[in-house]
Image: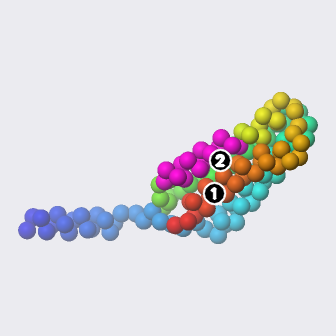
Amino acid sequence: MGQEADRAEQLRAIEEAPVLARPAGIRERLIGPLSAAALFAVAVTAAANRIPLLVGCLALAVLFGIVLGWRWFHLGAPGRRPHTKVEESVSLLAVVTSAFPGAKLLWDNPAPLPDALAAATVPAAALLAYLVLRWRR
């Protein structure tokens, strides 16, 4: 009898637990690719042109802000499932690769356009991969 009461209590606790499968909203799905495009545009424009050091630092802060902003949004959003190991890895990849264009931004050494495009493609693709992984369920 005691075991049946424990089972009933466990079932009740499971039913009352919050659901961690809230899907991404339409605004989030629209803003995600737009922010990846903004990351790409800022990285290419800043890396391919000769800009002052202060502007380069601001551009680098924008790059990191976009990537980390999405991560913090997903960590703090109510009703979302925890990050998987793959999502954690891709998120870290997006943050680290955001520094690729940074070498050209901080040392006032503009890159040729193909190099700037390549350096900007990697963090933008990593951000998109992170967002798709977060939205897949």
Residue drawn at point x = 89 percent, y = 46 percent? 113
Q: What range is drawn magenta here?
A: 84-98
Residue in the image at 56% along x and 60% along y? 134
Q: Name the residue under label 2.
A: 94
Question: What's the residue type where badge 2 is placed?
Answer: Ala
Three-letter code, disc 1: Ala
Badge 2: how crowded within 10 Å, few (<14), some, or many (20+)? many
Q: Where is residue 62 in the image (x, y as percent from the top left)?
A: 75, 44
Give the percent coordinates (x, y) of residue 29. Answer: 66, 65
Q: Give x and y (percent) for residue 39.
A: 76, 51
Q: In this view, does 93 lie above or below 7?
A: above
* Colouring scheme applied when the structure was drawn: rainbow
Which residue has dot 1 on it? 129
SS at circle 1? helix
> How packed is label 1: few (under 14 Cα within 10 Å), some, or many (20 or more)?
some
Which of 45 and 4 lies nearest the eye of the viewer? 45
Dominant secondary-structure state across the stretch colored magenta: helix
Callout 2–callout 1 Cβ contact below 8 Å: yes
Name the quadrant of the N terminus.
bottom left
- Can see residue 88? yes
Q: Is residue 60 above or below residue 71?
A: above
Does 95 appear in magenta? yes
Secondary structure state at the residue bearing disc 2: helix
In the image, residue 22 lies at what x, y percent? 50, 66
Image side of residue 24 versus residue 62, left or right: left
Number of numbered callouts drawn = 2
- Ranked by sequence position, the earlier of labels 2 and 1 is 2
The residue shown at (64%, 70%) is: 26
